[in-house]
Amino acid sequence: MEKPASEFVLNGPVSYWSVDRDQVLLLRSFFEFLQEAAIKHADQAGSGSRSKELRGETWVLYRIAAEVLRYPRYEEAVRVVTWSSGVRAFKGFRDFRVYCGDELIASASSLWLYLTVGAKALCRVPREVADRFPSRPGDVHCPDLEKLFLPSPAAGAPRAEVTLRYSDVDGNGHLNNTAYLDCLQTALSRGGLPARPRRVKVQFVKEVFPEAASVGVSLESRSGETCFGIWGPDGLAAQGTVA
């Protein structure tokens, strides 16, 4: 297997099923573009979606910080550029830039954890896998991502219940990270807050399994941004801020 290129580029139009009532790209769909680019690049290195069957190991998203300069509209052509910014022990770091034509519309940094599928235990990224990722440590959107303090709302913050669907669960057997963003956007809209945040920072804390019928999304305004917590049957599942 040849070593993949240092960058992976995903091109695609904004489809009608991925936009909201105003024909603007949904928050979930924005992150689906990033997820697809990350998986395709990892597949080229032999450690993406196929590694579950080959190795019994997988990547899960732990943290992401994104800045959206503009949400594209229906039928706009989107180009996602992604690269590995480093692999350390059981952690993988990945950056993204999103363009419409020559216009930069979003930047993001992410931190992924490598774990075994069966026990769901953290494990060191195998040397042969790490060596196949040509890392580019510079030009990172959020260099302090690993150290960011991401608060959750106070215990008494208002909470909206958001129903889950069959399609929200992914191949790892839990609520997909993009589904959390869908629930968040729903809660923001219901709470009368801007539903298209320009800055999104998320830490995924705990899995939500297919048996869950809904999650609770709590919101609290603090110092010009909104803290959020997403709660599953077993407690806090994700937390972060939007602005």
Image: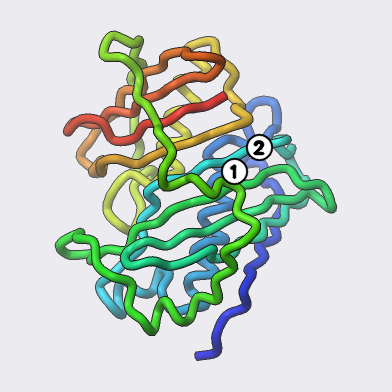
- Depicted 210 relative to depicted 239: above or below: below
Q: Residue 122 appears at what percent x and percent y?
A: 23, 61
136 left or right of 172 in image: right
Residue position marked by numbered label 2 in the rendering:
68
The crowding category of the residue bearing disc 2, from other C-alpha atoms within 10 Å (few below 14, some 14 to 19, many at least 20), is some
The mark closer to the camera, 2 or 1, is 2
Q: Which residue is mark 1?
A: 30
Query: Residue 223, relative to residue 71: is it above or below?
Result: above
Q: Mark 2 or mark 1, which has the lower sequence index?
A: 1
In the image, is residue 207 above or below residue 129? above
Residue occupying the point 47% across, 27% down: 241
Report whether 199 appears left or right of 155: right
- Residue contact between numbered discs 2 and 1, judged by CB atoms under 8 Å: yes
Q: In front: 75, or 123?
A: 123
Between residues 66 and 80, which one lies in front from this camera angle? 66
Q: Residue at x 33, y 44 (%)?
A: 175
Residue in the foreground of this view, choosing between 121 and 140: 140
Which secondary structure lies at badge 1?
helix
